[in-house]
Amino acid sequence: MTTPKGVLDFIAGVTWDDLPQEVRQQSKLCLLDLIGVGAGGAGTKLSRIIRDYSALDMSGALPMMFDGRGASAAGVALAGGMTIDALDGHDGFNPAKGHAGCGLLPALYGLAQDLNHVSGQEFLLCLTLGYELACRTALAQHASVAEYHTSGAWVAVAVAGVAARLMRLDGNQTAHAMGIAEYHGPRSQMMRCIDHPTMLKDGSGWGAMCGVSAARLAAAGFTGAPALTLGTDHWSDLGDTWLICQQYFKPYPVCRWAQAPITAVLDLKNRHGFDSQAITGLHILSFHESVRLGTKQVTTTEEAQYSTSFPCALALVHGTILPEHVADAALEHPEVQRLSSILTMEEDASANCAFPNRRLARAEITLATGQCLQSDWFEPDWDPTTPPSAEDLERKFFNYASPALGLARSQAIQRAVEALDHTATAQPLLDLLAQPIS
């Protein structure tokens, strides 16, 4: 079993040259996808509130992502993490039931702005290390308690670790930073936000803020209890198995638990070619957590993203789901509301047993003619076993980023990400992310 010292040595000692080529490429794909989702999320009410708050109550000189106003490093991490989380289209890790990158990127962005000496390779490397630390911490934390807590709990520990590396803390300081972050990380109850969809989301921004704060405290001599998660057997293959390559991506900006039902209803629509108005009945069989996404008549984008029925209705009406379809201004579409209201859901024992490593769903649709259609069992698209191509993710990036940032800026960001491992500084990319959205 890798000792806690082994984890600390990994954080301090790994270089870009140590990463396999597939890991290097995956880090760029994850980065581009996160930026696109963040650009889409910046237009939400949630993002506007948290950026206003960070500018006012967490003031500093570092420009927030997609905003430009100044905040502290912790404030930049909070605002950026919640901005990405505001649009539920970012990558995730099935066994952890959550998301590593959402909190990692804005924390690294803020710290790199503050330190002003971070190369492109180091930025990508720290993002990659963060995924490893976050996902393994998640497995250890979830094994320690029965209750399902938000991603912020384990992202905080990972952020503290990579922040310590960027800040060049020694092993003892890094251990304290991760211990502080584990102690104070937001172990908030995720299912409360599933049952009551609000702006709390997955705790990623809070975890990012906590991790940055923990590293800064440790640098100043603040001490923390040992991070218990670092002493478990989830670290035994650290540096051999790269969990960043086991992330899923989302084709649609809604909860992952609703993605298999979406795939199932779209399969029926594509195979049988019916119009949505011909549908008189909709039934979804899936796992318990998907059924818990029970909001049918939505009034906010948070309710739309944390629903199974509403996204299925969107897919049947539009043939896909884009950020514009879950925006507050688009939620009163009468046909979408009708389909969402008639959809029923049922738990399936086999789907429950397969969760969380697999998310299964089957759809049954009844047409006005009386015909009853039944899909096969489906898993979400773009799982690690059937990943999207680089072209798929680039297309998604432009679909999300261009409406918010414009095509020229989006293209510049894409080029900057692709060239990042060959640049002496990450600053050109950081400057593109810092510019406010007009």
Image: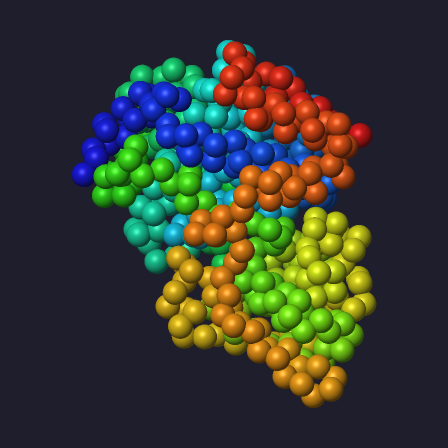
Q: Residue at x 43, y 69 (%)?
A: 351
| Residue 110 in view in this figure | no
Say which quarter of the image contains residue 265.
bottom right
| Residue 242 in view in this figure | yes
Q: Does residue 298 sit above or below 190 in this rendering?
A: below
Which of the two residues, 208 or 6, is positioned nearer the viewer here? 6
Say which quarter of the image contains residue 3.
top left
Question: Residue 186, position in %: x, y?
Answer: 45, 43
Q: Is residue 323 left or right of residue 259?
A: right
Question: Residue 34, position in %: x, y?
Answer: 57, 37
Q: Is residue 317 left or right of residue 242?
A: right
Q: Tell which residue pokes out farthest to the left in this image.
A: 1
Question: Residue 276, position in %: x, y?
Answer: 75, 71
Q: Residue at x 65, y 41 (%)?
A: 395
Q: Residue at x 64, y 70 (%)?
A: 271
Q: Residue at x 60, y 44 (%)?
A: 392
Q: Tell which residue pokes out farthest to the bottom in this image.
A: 370
Which of the two residues, 30 or 65, is positioned nearer the viewer here? 30
Number of numbered labels in the structure image: 0
Q: Is residue 309 left or right of residue 109?
A: right
Question: Residue 179, position in %: x, y?
Answer: 33, 32
Q: How is the image coloured?
A: rainbow
Q: Is residue 43 left or right of residue 25?
A: right
Which of the two residues, 23 or 36, is positioned nearer the viewer here? 23
Identify the image quadrant of the C terminus.
top right
Identify the image quadrant of the N terminus.
top left
